[in-house]
C-alpha cells in the first residue's frame, strides 16, 4: 500500500523566510531611507535622474540585506577567510594594475570597474571575528599581534591609493573588533593620548604649522591641505575652504525650524558643492533646521543602540564581535560625515548613511545590515 505525504501549502513553506526579523531595526532603517529620499528630491533637483537612482540604490540595498539575512552566522564565519583573501588580492591588483582618477588609484578594471576597498569594510571585521572565535578561551598577547597584522595590511594598502576616508572606516571596524574582543586598556590609552596630543599641538600651532617649509610625515600633500583648511578655511575661501564655508553657512541659515522643503537657497542656488553626496547634510540642515537635525541624529542613535543590543544578545563570540563592528561602522560613517560638514573634522570622502547619493556605499551598508539581521534572526529562531 503506497504511503502519501501531505505537502504543506506554499505560503507555509515560504513563511520562515520572513520570520525572526528585528522590526525595531527595520523601523530605524525605514525612517532614514525616507528622510534620504525627501532630501535627495530637493538637493538633487537639477541632477536629472539622481532621485530615481537613489531610490533604485535603496531597493538594491534592501534586496542585498534580505538575502544576507538568510545566511546564518555560521555560514558567514566560513566565508570570512575567502572574502578577506580575495579583498587583499584585489587591493594588491589595484597597486599594480589600478585605474587612476583625479590623482587616486582606487579602482580595478575586471571587465567592469570595481573599488576593492569597499569589500574590506565587511571582510575585515569578518576575518577578525573569525580569528578571535578560533582563539576563544586561550587568547594571548601574540593573538592580538596577529590581529593587528590582519588589520594593518589592508589599511596600509588603502591609504597608499590614497583613500583616507575608506581607510578610516576600515580601521575603525577593525579596531572595534579588537576592543570588543577584550584588548587591554593599557594598550588602548597610550596611542589615544599620543593622537590627542598631536591634535592639540596642531590646533595650538595655528597657521604656523601650515607654512610650506613645515614637513608633515606620513601625509600626502592633499591631506595636509585638508587639515590646514580645517584650521583656517577662510585662508582660501574660494578654493580649498569653499566646501566648509558654504556648508556652515547653509547649516546656520537653517535656524531652528529650517527654511522649508525645497526652499533652501544655498542648495538651490548651487552654493553647496557635492550637495547630493558628501555635503548632503548641509542641504538637509538648511531646509529642516535644528529640529530636523535632532530628528535625524536620533534615528541614527536608535539604529546604533539597536545594533549594540543585537551584539550583546548574540549567541557566540563571533556573532557578538561581528555585530559590534558592523554597528561601529554606522557610527563612524555618521560621525565623520557630520563632523566634516560642520567643520570639526577634515573633509574626507565619507557618505552619510542612506542620505548621500552613491550605489556602492548603499549596497555595502545594506550588506552590513543584512549581517546584523542574520545574527538577530539566529537568536530569535533559536528561542522559538
Image (spheres, grey):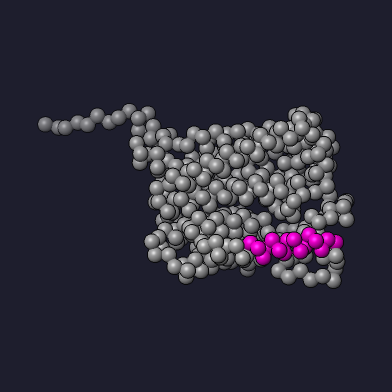
324 in relation to 208, above or below = above
* Residue shown at 60% from the left, 44% from the top: 362
Q: Is residue 281 visible?
A: yes
User: Which quadrant of the view contains residue 287?
Assistant: top right
Q: Position of residue 96 (x, y in %)?
A: 63, 68
Residue 9 place in picture, x, y as percent = 33, 28
Q: With respect to residue 48, does 177 lie above or below?
A: below
Residue 104 is one of the magenta-drawn residues: no
Which secondary structure is most common in the magenta stretch?
A: helix
- Residue closest to the eye, 292 or 187: 187
Tell me the quarter of the picture where residue 246 sits: top right
Tell me which corner region of the image, top left, top right, bottom left or bottom right, holds residue 47. top right
Q: Residue 296: x percent and y percent?
A: 66, 37
Q: Which residues are magenta?
A: 192-207
Looking at the image, the residue that sits furthest to the left is 1
Q: How many marks?
A: 0
| Magenta span includes 196 | yes
Q: Position of residue 49 (x, y in %)?
A: 70, 37
Seen at 59% across and 56% down, the residue is 172
The answer to whether residue 90 of the structure is visible from this angle is: no
Which residue is located at x 71 percent, y 69 percent? 218
Q: Could you tell me which quadrant the N terminus lies in?
A: top left
The residue depicted at 55 percent of the width and 65 percent of the height is 186
Q: Nearer the viewer, residue 183 or 216?
A: 183
Figure check: 33 above or below 179:
above
**Seen in the image, is 111 located left or right of residue 127?**
right
Near-viewer residue (192 or 120): 192
Q: Quadrant of the C terminus?
A: top left
235 relative position to 203: left or right = right
Establish if 79 lies above or below 96.
Answer: above
Amino acid at each position: 500500500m503506497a504511503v502519501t505525504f501531505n505537502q504543506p501549502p506554499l505560503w507555509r513553506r515560504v513563511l520562515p523566510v520572513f520570520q525572526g526579523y528585528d522590526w525595531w531595526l527595520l523601523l530605524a532603517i525605514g525612517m532614514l531611507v525616507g528622510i534620504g529620499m525627501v532630501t535627495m528630491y530637493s538637493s538633487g533637483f537639477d541632477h536629472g535622474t539622481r532621485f530615481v537612482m537613489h531610490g533604485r540604490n535603496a531597493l538594491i540595498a534592501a534586496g542585498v540585506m534580505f538575502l544576507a539575512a538568510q545566511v546564518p552566522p555560521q555560514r558567514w564565519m566560513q566565508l570570512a577567510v575567502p572574502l578577506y583573501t580575495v579583498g587583499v588580492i584585489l587591493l594588491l591588483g589595484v597597486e599594480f594594475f589600478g585605474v587612476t582618477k583625479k590623482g587616486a588609484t582606487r579602482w580595478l578594471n575586471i571587465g567592469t570597474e570595481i573599488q576593492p576597498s569597499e569589500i574590506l569594510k565587511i571582510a575585515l571585521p569578518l576575518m577578525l571575528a573569525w580569528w578571535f572565535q578560533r582563539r576563544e578561551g586561550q587568547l594571548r598577547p601574540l593573538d592580538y599581534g596577529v590581529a593587528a597584522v590582519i588589520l594593518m595590511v589592508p589599511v596600509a594598502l588603502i591609504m597608499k591609493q590614497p583613500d583616507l576616508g575608506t581607510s578610516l572606516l576600515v580601521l575603525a571596524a577593525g579596531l572595534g573588533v579588537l576592543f570588543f574582543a577584550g584588548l587591554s586598556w593599557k594598550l588602548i590609552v597610550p596611542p589615544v593620548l599620543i593622537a590627542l596630543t598631536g591634535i592639540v599641538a596642531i590646533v595650538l600651532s595655528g597657521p604656523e604649522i601650515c607654512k610650506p617649509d613645515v614637513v608633515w610625515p606620513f601625509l600626502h600633500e592633499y591631506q595636509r591641505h585638508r587639515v590646514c583648511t580645517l584650521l583656517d578655511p577662510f585662508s582660501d575661501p574660494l578654493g580649498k575652504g569653499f566646501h566648509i564655508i558654504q556648508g556652515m553657512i547653509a547649516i546656520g541659515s537653517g535656524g531652528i525650524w529650517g527654511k522649508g522643503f525645497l526652499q533652501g537657497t544655498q542648495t538651490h542656488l548651487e552654493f553647496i558643492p557635492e550637495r547630493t553626496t558628501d555635503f548632503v547634510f548641509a542641504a538637509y540642515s538648511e531646509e529642516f533646521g535644528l529640529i530636523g537635525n535632532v530628528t535625524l541624529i536620533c534615528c541614527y542613535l536608535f539604529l546604533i543602540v539597536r545594533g549594540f543590543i543585537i551584539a550583546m544578545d548574540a549567541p557566540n563570540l563571533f556573532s557578538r564581535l561581528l555585530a559590534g563592528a558592523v554597528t561601529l561602522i554606522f557610527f563612524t560613517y555618521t560621525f565623520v560625515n557630520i563632523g566634516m560638514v560642520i567643520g570639526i573634522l577634515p573633509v574626507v570622502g565619507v557618505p552619510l548613511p542612506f542620505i548621500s547619493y552613491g550605489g556602492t556605499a548603499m549596497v555595502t551598508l545594506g550588506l552590513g545590515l543584512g549581517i546584523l539581521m542574520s545574527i538577530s534572526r539566529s537568536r530569535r529562531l533559536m528561542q522559538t
